[in-house]
Amino acid sequence: MTMNLTRLLQATLLCMAVFVAPVYAQTFKMPCEVEGVIPAMDDLKIKPQKVVIEIQSMGKNIFLKMNGPEPYMLVANSLATEEYTGKNLTTAKEMGAFRKHKVTGAESEIRIEQATVIVTAFTDTTYMGKKVRVSITGPCGMPR
């Protein structure tokens, strides 16, 4: 009886440890040198910048985040929420995600080509009081 109680207690503690412990997805960081263009404003070029793209995957969802100065700060993921729709764009040749705000219609997308490690992205933003789409592209280094 004591042996069964001990095993039950051990099993219960193990289950609690597994279900209570936080789940963390490993984040890969990829340095990139990107340049932005606003096609709607006669291909206005935006000053090139160094950015870092954070890559996470949890289950079937992919999370991509470009960290840099405005307008090079954007998020794209495949997670669908009350505010956003998302889509995983990953194929055998590239990794990518798309996100759209349900109310405003603002979209963002990040794609990283596997063979060349070049990022292409876009985001809808406000520039000089006008809603525009910024197209972003540039080479990246390998993730750390």
Image (cartoon, rainbow, N blue to C red):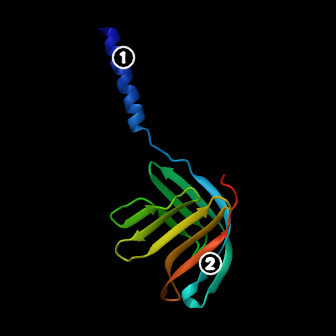
Query: For this rendering, which residue is in front, 121 or 7?
Result: 121
For disc 1, the marked residue is 7
Which residue does the image show at 62% across and 56% down from the upper left?
29
Q: Are marks 1 and 2 in contact (CB under 8 Å)?
A: no
**Circle 1: residue type:** Arg
Name of the residue lying farthest toward the bottom: 42
Q: Earlier in the sequence, mark 1 or mark 2?
A: 1
For disc 2, the marked residue is 36
In this rendering, the answer to whether 90 lies above or below 17 is: below
**In which quarter of the view is residue 79 placed?**
bottom left
Name of the residue lying farthest toward the left: 1
**In which quarter of the view is residue 137 placed?**
bottom right
* Rendered location of residue 36, percent (x, y): 62, 78
Q: Residues within 10 Å of mark 1 (few under 14, many from 20)?
A: few
In this rendering, the answer to whether 83 lies above or below 55 is: below
**Circle 2: residue type:** Gly
From mark 1 to mark 2, how far is it between C-alphas? 61 Å
Q: Name the image quarter holding the N terminus.
A: top left
Name the mark on residue 87: none
Name of the residue lying farthest toward the front: 92
* Rendered location of residue 80, percent (x, y): 37, 61
* Rendered location of residue 15, percent (x, y): 38, 30
Nearer mark to the viewer, of 1 and 2? 2
Query: For this rendering, which residue is in front, 75 or 16?
Result: 75
* Rendered location of residue 20, percent (x, y): 39, 38
Q: Residues within 10 Å of mark 2 (few under 14, many from 20)?
A: many
Which residue does the image show at 38% across and 77% down from the upper left?
104
Secondary structure found at label 2: strand
Is 59 left, or right, of 116 in this rendering? left
Secondary structure found at label 1: helix
In this rendering, the answer to whether 38 lies above or below 27 is: below
